[in-house]
Image: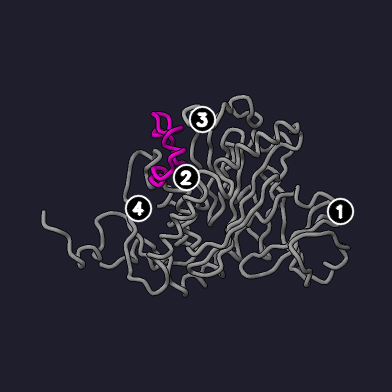
Amino acid sequence: MSARNHKNWLAKPPVEAISSECYSSQEIFEEEIKNIFAKVWVPVIHKSEVRNKGDYRTSQIAFQNIIIINLGERIGCYINPGVKGVAGNIDFALTHTSRELYCEVKHGGMVWATLDPEPSMSVEEWTAGAFDCIAGAIDTEELEVFHYHKAVIPTNYKLWHDTNSEFYHDFMHYFNRVTGFNDEYFARKNIAFDNGHVNVSSFTVQYGQYEGAGDREALSFPTLPPNQWYMVDLFPGFNFNLRGSAFRSDSVTPLGPNSVLIEFRGYGLLKDTPEERKQRIDHHNTIWGPFGRNLHEDLLGVSGQGVAMAPGTERRNILHGRHENETIHDEVGMRHYYSEWGKYLDIDPYNMVDK
């Protein structure tokens, strides 16, 4: 077989593929903000972050500043009337002149908001059953946030979501290779749901195979057997990761074609004893803290992709052609996501590549 030349590499592949223009185009980015992020339900905070009446946190959806406030009898979301700071306590009367947004508390106490003035679906309808696999674990007992950090990453928001949807990058994680590469891992299923969502079925992580990881079987979440690992990927860029004793969520706020703010939260049970909470924090931070084993490896990976697919770079084809009966390395999650993405933008992402 002769070597592939430059023209061969740019030609349309004989399998499903999207163009890097999906990531690098300013025009597409602006359409995403207007037609996706301004219309979908967004998990903005967790209710434990506004525990008392008057407590607030500020956030942003589609470049619109919003404020989430505990009103006493409920949590409300509003267009921010000019409140400064990330969090605090204020007289909720300040919001009376602001437009109130549709807001719901669902799925483990997450506060969801949408800029859509007439949403056609509730949060439960929009998530379409994707949370069913972890509902018992996150809804049986009250959760609270014990960890929060954020990062602005030079990459496209979809590349971050992709890293939670494709699993060959797991080979980059030494921790995952040592504790997880077994028959159960490779048999996991990618399960597609309406509205572009996917969840990944569980398997048993063997933490004892990693020196220093310790025994994690004694601490889990309600109804969850020890050392199980489920993942829920919500369109267009929200991830919920339940790994035995540790639960994490990621929320993206796109800032540009090659810039995204990612907010990371770690959760425990409100009823945790001090010793249980310490264990959860240790287990969470070992893998997902800013200096943990895995998170910085993911961020380095997508930053490199950001360099390769930044605005002004040569157009490339990204393959989504792997079919393996919807098991862990099948790219069904990617194909499902980008098919939904194309509906919002009225384009076919699989017909954008060079002919």
| Mark 3 vs 4: CB contact within 8 A | no
Residue 130 in sight: no
Mark with earlier residue (3, 4): 3
Q: Secondary structure at mark 3?
A: helix
Question: Which disc, if any, is residue 320?
Answer: 4
Q: Is residue 94 magenta?
A: no
Q: Which residues are magenta?
A: 167-193
Q: Where does residue 336 sit, x and y in percent of width and height?
A: 43, 51
Whether residue 104 sits left or right of residue 174 in the image: it is: right
- Please determine whether, in this image, residue 26 is positioned above or below residue 343: below
- Please determine whether, in this image, residue 298 is positioned above or below residue 352: above
Q: Secondary structure at mark 4?
A: loop
Mark with earlier residue (4, 1): 1
Whether residue 76 sits left or right of residue 110 in the image: it is: right
What amino acid is found at the position of numbered circle 3 in the picture?
A: Tyr
In this figure, which residue is indicated by the disc labeled 1? 53
